[in-house]
Amino acid sequence: MPDRTKFVLDEKQMPTSWYNIIPDLPSPLAPPLHPQTDEPVGPEALAPLFPMELIKQEMSPERFIEIPEEVQAVYKTYRPSPLNRARQLERDLGLPEGVKIFYKYEGVSPAGSHKPNTAIPQAFYNKLEGIKRISTETGAGQWGSAMSIACALYDMECVVYMVGISYKQKPYRRILMESYGAEVIASPSTRTNAGRHVLDMDPDSLGSLGIAISEAVEDAVSRDDTHYCLGSVLNHVCLHQTIIGEEAIVQMEMAQVEPDVVVACVGGGSNFAGITFPYYKRRLDGKTKARLVAVEPKACPTLTAGEYRYDLGDEAGMTPKMLMYTLGHDFVPAGIHAGGLRYHGDSPLVSQLAKEGEIEAVAVHQNACFEAAVQFAKAEGILPAPESSHAIRAAIDEALDAREAGEDRTILFCLSGHGHFDLAAYEAYNSGKLQDYDFAAGSMCEGA
């Protein structure tokens, strides 16, 4: 069995407020713009999609926002999540005592990932406003699973537009969502104008999160009883996820060590924001000097190869334009198994921090990530989600770099979910069939 040191909080120690990074940004956050007029949009433009409380959170100047007691009660069914020291992995890597690896494990939630941290409050606020039905999208299925569970808890209908390639690659995620009562539709679909338009151009489209978002938004605005929910990118989503980092700070204090680097994978930015934003605040307060590292796939390297500009959040142009790093809203990534990282843009908050040099970003190939994931699983007994494997790859690289440099280094990463529904991806890796794709090269890598 793995030799771990686990740091577990009592539910009474769970944070009661979310941390809002907006008032602490180095410069003001750029406003979203109307997709047709390019004028800044106000709350009224978002009202057809979101409940007013989430709209307020999206634009709030308050540093800390109280978590409703009803939401706290649901959180306590799986939170606080554990923090582990990966001692067996450290031994396998031949690390000296001064190089330590810790991971915050979010796979203990009912959905097996960090996604319920925002799905639960989003469903709660929509229920308060009388909404009876939620439309959303999902990449790998983790967000769709979380939203399906949240809707079941609050007795709301849920329809999920699942990116087509993931719909095929991950049938058990679809079955899980359907078991919770959700309707799951492969995107692009013939159900919406946005989906039909894509299929007319490319009947064999793999789909993308941008396309699935267009379909879900179109679905929501076509019905008075329906709102749209998003699992990443937006400010209020990043806000809800900060409970991860707030807990981690307390747990690392229990371990009597301060991280030198905090690592998380990044697609839209939610789990990265969740663990790093509280550490950004801690750095502002002079309590840490931790580097904050975002890890993305080379097949969809938004922060490392994208342009920093205003762009649409979806393929069809139904969402506001946001200032972010982007590969273009019509970009369709290769069909890598880390479906949750196949998004053309990034959170405006994460993008601004990257632009201003407050965070670092690296891109890695999926074969290297799966190599790290299997090494981690053999050492620690947890099979990671393909998305999370990107953080593991970077954490291992940080540890090996410190070993070679003869430096002490404490590494903390977010293990954002388990890979129990991703066994087809592991089968492809184990059999040598997993392919690497490189955005810069524009194709599959030779020899992959």
Image (spheres, helix red, strand yellow):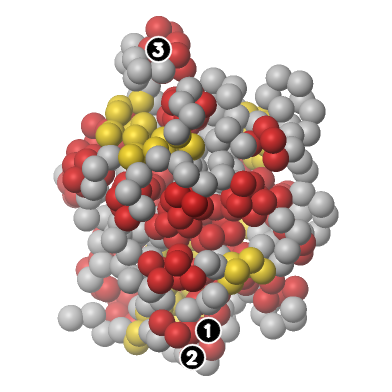
Picture quadrant where residue 85 is located? bottom left
* Residue 333 visible (yes or no): no
Q: Which mark is residue 250?
A: 1
* Residue 287: image location, x then y, percent: 69, 83
Q: Quadrant of residue 242?
A: bottom right
Whether label 1 touches label 2, CB < 8 Å: yes
Give the percent coordinates (x, y) of residue 446.
37, 33
Secondary element under disc 3, as helix, strand or loop, is: helix
Q: Tell me: residue 216, above or below residue 302.
A: above
Residue 175 in picture, x, y percent from top left: 19, 42
Q: Amino acid at mark 3?
A: Arg
Q: Of discs 3 and 2, which sits in the foreground? A: 3
Q: Which residue is mark 3?
A: 196
The residue labelled by disc 2 is 254
Q: Residue at x 48, y 29 (%)?
A: 224
- Secondary structure category for the residue under label 2: helix
> At x 56% / y 41%, what residue is drawn?
50
Query: Where 341 sits versus 78, above or below?
Result: above
Indicate the amino acid at tag 2. Met
Q: What amino acid does circle 1 point to?
A: Val
In the rendered image, the vertical position of residue 346 relative to residue 62, given as above or below: above
- In this rendering, position of residue 286 left or right of residue 112: right
Q: Residues within 10 Å of mark 2 (few under 14, many from 20)?
A: few
User: Decide: marks 3, 2 in contact (CB < 8 A)?
Assistant: no
Q: Which residue extends farthest front?
A: 130
On-image quarter of the C terminus: top left
Query: Quick check: 117 left or right of 238?
Result: left
Q: CA distance from mark 1 to mark 2?
A: 6 Å
